Image (cartoon, grey):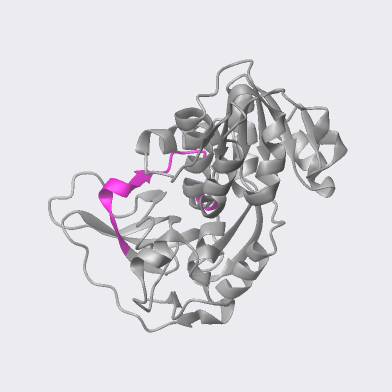
Amino acid sequence: MSALELRAYGGVENLVFNDSTEVALPEKDEVQVRILAAGVNVIDTKIRQGTSFAAKTRGERFPWTIGFDMSGEVVKVPKDCEDFQEGDLVCGLVGFPLNGGAYSSVNNFQTSELIKIPEGCGIKVAGALPLAGLTAYQALFDIGHLQPEQTVIISAAAGGVGHIAVQLAKNAGARVLGICSKENHKFVKGLGADAVAEYDNEECLKWQSEADLFIDLVGGQSAINNLSLLKLNATMVSVPTITYQAVRLAATDMSINVAGMVVKHNKLQLKKMLDMIADGELKVHISESFFLKDGAKAHAVIGCGHTVGKVILLPNGIVCEVKP
């Protein structure tokens, strides 16, 4: 098999394509999957740089094949496996956050992390969905407790997590306000946002004290500046863990709750979103696709901070979607 291996923390040059790696037979609680699409996420770049919690926890154990969300075809199953069979199309949030393994052409994954892709849902969008989709879902509903007719503001609303969060919130009956770059306003409005504004712009001032919930996908000073957009006793879910404590400290005397989060695997939530995609109620926008050997280029694109939707890797080449 081939894999994109992280050989050291630092720049994109530390992602090295290896086309002669080996994969063992799957254990009794695993299946072997030929990976057709793997999501590239901001957390991947933080791990590569060595700044994330996962990198600090794992330490200098290299090579490391990262990548945490994927879709593919089951190619080997152990004896007595009842959940999957060869030929099944599956996806999942895999090995998060300390192992991964999705940046490879073939790999073994825990059956508990995988779910079958429903008819009507494309393979590539299924591979792009898990980490971003579960982050959006859990921020909105598990931590933010969003209710119908409430107002939610979402920063980085055109990004991987943000563009899914806009749709999920709107589908739940909320009033959705998005913050993104001016060139992405049309895209975010097309997702269903009721209004859109630029970052740290006077347009945002008209939203002061309007939000019941703020989904912060930027962190740092931007998040601190946006605390004034929340009602008293409202909640900001600040997803970037590296600046969460600073944002929480800034809100100390503001009667605002600032909550952090780490995404968790949840099959039921993932299935719900896959079914929404199959039914045309949720779209995952893929802006760029790269072959596995070009994974460093994908990281460079993500690192610029202005990606619209998701970026994916195609570890086994071009994927031909089969229409149901």
Total marks shown come to 0
Q: Eyeballing the image, is 67 above or below 233?
A: below
The part of the image, by quadrant, that contains residue 279 is top right
120 inside magenta stretch: yes
Left or right of 74 on screen, residue 199: right
Q: Which residue occupies 30% across, 78% down? A: 22
Left or right: 148 with respect to 141? right
Residue 100 % position (x, y): 38, 62
- Residue placed furthest toward the right: 202
Q: Indicate the position of residue 161 as horizontal and vertical percent values.
A: 59, 45
| Residue 296: image location, x then y, percent | 58, 74
Q: Determine the residue positioned at 81% across, 37% down.
A: 197
Q: Quadrant of the N terminus?
A: bottom left
The residue at the point 54 percent across, 53 percent down is 124
Q: Is residue 230 visible?
A: yes
Q: Where residue 258 appears, x then y in whole percent?
A: 54, 35
Viewer-nearest residue: 218 or 309: 218
Instruction: List the single residue furthest toward the left.
Output: 80
Which residue occupies the foreground of this view, 306 or 287? 306
Query: Is residue 122 at all visible to an observer of this figure?
Result: no
The reply to whether the magenta stretch includes residue 84 is no
Please say if 100 is above or below 282. below
Residue furthest out toward the top: 149
Q: Quadrant of residue 206?
A: top right
Q: Which residues are magenta?
A: 108-125
